[in-house]
Amino acid sequence: MSIFIRIWFFFGLIILLGLWFISYTFNQQVKPNVRQVVEDTLAENANIIAMLVAEDVYDNRVNTPQFDEKIQKALHRKLNAKIWQFNKKEINQQIYITNSQGIVIYDSQGMATRQDYSQWNDVYLTLRGKYGVRSTRNYDAQGNDLGSINSTMFIAAPIYYPINQKQKLIGVVSIGKPNISVQPYIQRAENQLIRQAAWITLLSLFLASLVAYWLKHSIDRVRKYAQALAPVNQTPHFRSAKELNLVTQAVENMREKLEDRAYVEHYVNTLTHELKSPLTAIQASAELLKEDLPLQDQQQFAAHIHEQSHRLRSLIDRMLLLTRLEKSKHQIEIQSFNVSELIQQILDQHASQIQAKKIQCLLDLEPNCMIHADRFWMQQTIANLLDNALDFSADTAKILIQLHRSHHLQNKQHIELNLFNEGEWIPDYALPQVFDTYFSLPRPMSQQRSSGIGLSIVKQVIEQHHGRIQIQNIHVNAISILQPHQQGVLVKIQLP
């Protein structure tokens, strides 16, 4: 079961348990509290009526038609009261009066007159100076119990009358009110509670779904980050989620250690493989030089040793550059400088190689072309591209360098640098791999391969500057300032 379903399920379970508890509390507290309010009102009314009928009870006028008519008019008085969205039209109460022995001397319903109520709690307790109250269930015509909702609550009050300057208990008045008369108010409160609980449940489940999805999505991000060991992956950060950020940081630390270990292993294996060939050549030439050889052969083997030593130094320098570049990601030093002047300086440094091969170098540079970038790495990039162009150009071939500014979407300015070298095309199978580390092609003249690091450095530098680079085979007639019917390789760089 996914964490999304688990969180949603347990959150929903907690909500349902909370609603059940609220419903239970309502039944245990709200309903009794409503009846307590009714009881409080009846107790006040009973004592008021006890004071009003005291003289009638003493004079034995409660059995007269006039007294009954007065009570019936009071109980059947029409009302027009709107109480909490309910229109109350009539009084739902009944009254009976007993004498000091508990015998009913008046009943508003005319059913209990002359009956002995001395053992009913309301009359029994009141006659003994206590608070008298009882609740009696009602029954239908067949004698079936109608339940607690249809029960009637009776509250009694003592009737006192002054005799010989003393208050004497002469009877008890009881007021009854059916519990069903307050049921609409209880039912309305229950219905409102159910509606609000339903809305709260739906909203809570929706919020629980959002929280569960956020947690699942965040955990998936951490998982994908842990699985993807590519160094360009950025560490995810979560707002208001300290624990997830701590997990991410722990994964980042573990990942860095694993990457460092893997990098060192890969670095050592690659360096060992690349150094093996030139070292073998140097060792063989050195052993041959121990022999008594003609001067011409000695010079040839010495030149071979010098060439392989230069190759070793170039390999080590580029490996160190690649290591420095990969370990300094997001730490490039941005500064403003003139790219046009930088290209001229690099051409001056390569002047001897250009002259040796009688390369015709054509320039189309926009003057004072400024850029915000890391000058050191941009110099390494352009120098590597020029080295590559010279290696793959035949004698007397043409090299074209173009530099200009251009505008693109959202009116943002870009620098475009094109470097074209006349010569053989890159094989189709090699085009997707030219920027891969340690991939190289044999040079046309010497058939020797380079370290395969130069173009990899170029691509990483351009990407760290948020630029784009592509390499393609083209015909010369695509470039207007060159003579047609020739072919070569074009490297296009776009930098913000």
Image: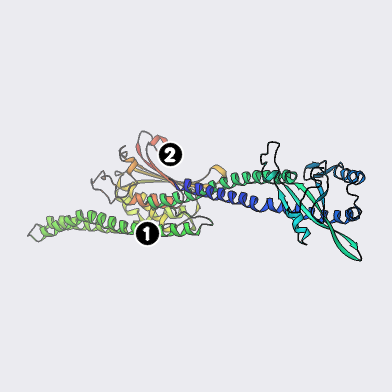
Tell me the CA gap for discs 2 and 1.
55 Å
User: Toward the viewer: 38 or 283?
Assistant: 38
Residue at the spot 88% in from the left edge and 57% down from the top edge: 51
Q: Is residue 174 visible?
A: yes
User: Toward the viewer: 492 or 478?
Assistant: 492
Above or below 342: residue 69: above
Q: Which residue is mark 1?
A: 254
Query: In the visual, does 281 lie left or right of 482?
Result: left
In the orientation shown, which residue stands out farthest toward the left? 292
Residue type at mark 1: give it: Met
Is disc 1 placed on a helix, strand or loop?
Answer: helix
Residue at the spot 44% in from the left edge and 58% down from the top edge: 247
Residue at the spot 35% in from the left edge and 54% down from the top edge: 350
Q: Quadrant of residue 475?
A: top left
Query: In the visual, does 97 lie left or right of 246?
Result: right
Residue 481's label in the rendered image is: 2
Q: Quadrant of residue 126?
A: bottom right
Query: Which percent across, then down, holds residue 466?
Result: 46, 50
User: Toward the viewer: 38 or 338?
Assistant: 38
Query: Which percent across, then down, holds residue 60?
Result: 90, 52
Query: Which percent across, then down, holds residue 216?
Result: 47, 48
Residue type at mark 2: give it: Ile
Residue at the spot 42% in from the left edge and 38% down from the top edge: 479
Marks counted in the figure total: 2
Query: Which percent across, then down, holds residue 441?
Result: 27, 44
Quarter of the image containing the N terminus?
top left
Above or below 430: residue 341: below
Query: In the visual, does 399 lie left or right of 285?
Result: right
Label 2–label 1 contact, CB within 8 A: no
> Mark 2 vs mark 1: which is more N-terminal?
1
